[in-house]
DNA sequence: ATTCTGACGTGGG
DNA sequence: CCCCACGCCAGAA
């Protein structure tokens, strides 16, 4: 399982390190891993992370700050509620003050 | 084996 | 500023 590939494992590691009340983008993680063009794979990894409860996938959004994957969660607005529960303001599936809550692995990690 | 789509991002017109 | 196309990799039909 964990041998699915270093890439997925790395994504999980970074996602786990996302601080409370913060969010990051797929591209940021992908870039940090050196696969900036494979940002899609990051999302795919998140899909697999469904098995890993330790992965706060709700804290990962696209570079637009939009909750693109909110439909992949159990509920319709479960992702938004989780983010708001952390103090993040979300409006119409879009994170407000995105730059303020944005967590950059390059800068923070 | 082939084809398409998908939780994205960047670049060009 | 808005719209379109391309790249990337992996899994499903």
Image (cartoon, coloured by chain):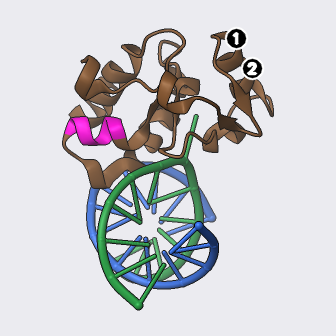
Chain colours: A brown, B green, C blue
Q: Measured along the vertical axis of the image, is residue A88 above or below residue C8?
A: above
The residue positioned 29% from the left and 25% from the top of the image is A105
Which quadrant of the figure contains the C terminus of chain A?
top left
Which residue reaches farthest left?
A34
Q: Are marks 1 and 2 on the same chain?
A: yes
Q: Position of residue A32 (x, y in %)?
A: 23, 35
- The residue that disc 1 covers is A85
Which quadrant of the figure contains the N terminus of chain A?
top left
- Callout 2 crowding tier (Cα within 10 Å): few <14, some 14–19, many ≥20: some
Q: Position of residue A54 (x, y in %)?
A: 48, 12
Q: Measured along the vertical axis of the image, is residue A65 above or below residue B7?
A: above
Circle 1 SS class: helix
Report the magenta residues as a range: A28-33
Q: Give residue A63's mark.
A: none
Magenta: main secondary structure equals helix
Left/right of residue A77 with respect to residue B3 in the rendered view? right
The answer to whether residue A80 is visible is yes
Q: Nearer the viewer, residue A55 or A5?
A: A55
Q: Measured along the vertical axis of the image, is residue A86 above or below residue A38?
A: above
Q: Label 2 is found on which chain of the structure?
A: A
The answer to whether residue A5 is visible is no
Q: Give residue A81's mark.
A: 2
Circle 2 SS class: helix
């Amino acid at each position: 399982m964990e041998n699915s590939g270093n890439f997925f494992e790395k994504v999980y590691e970074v996602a786990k390190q996302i601080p409370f009340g913060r969010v990051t983008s797929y591209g940021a993680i992908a870039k940090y891993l050196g696969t900036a063009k494979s940002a899609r794979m990051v999302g795919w990894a998140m899909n697999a992370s469904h098995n890993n409860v330790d992965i706060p996938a709700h804290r990962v959004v696209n570079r637009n700050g939009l909750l693109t994957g909110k439909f992949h969660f159990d509920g319709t607005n479960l992702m938004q509620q989780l983010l708001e529960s952390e103090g993040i303001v979300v409006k119409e599936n879009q994170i407000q003050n995105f730059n303020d809550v944005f967590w950059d692995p390059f800068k923070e990690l």
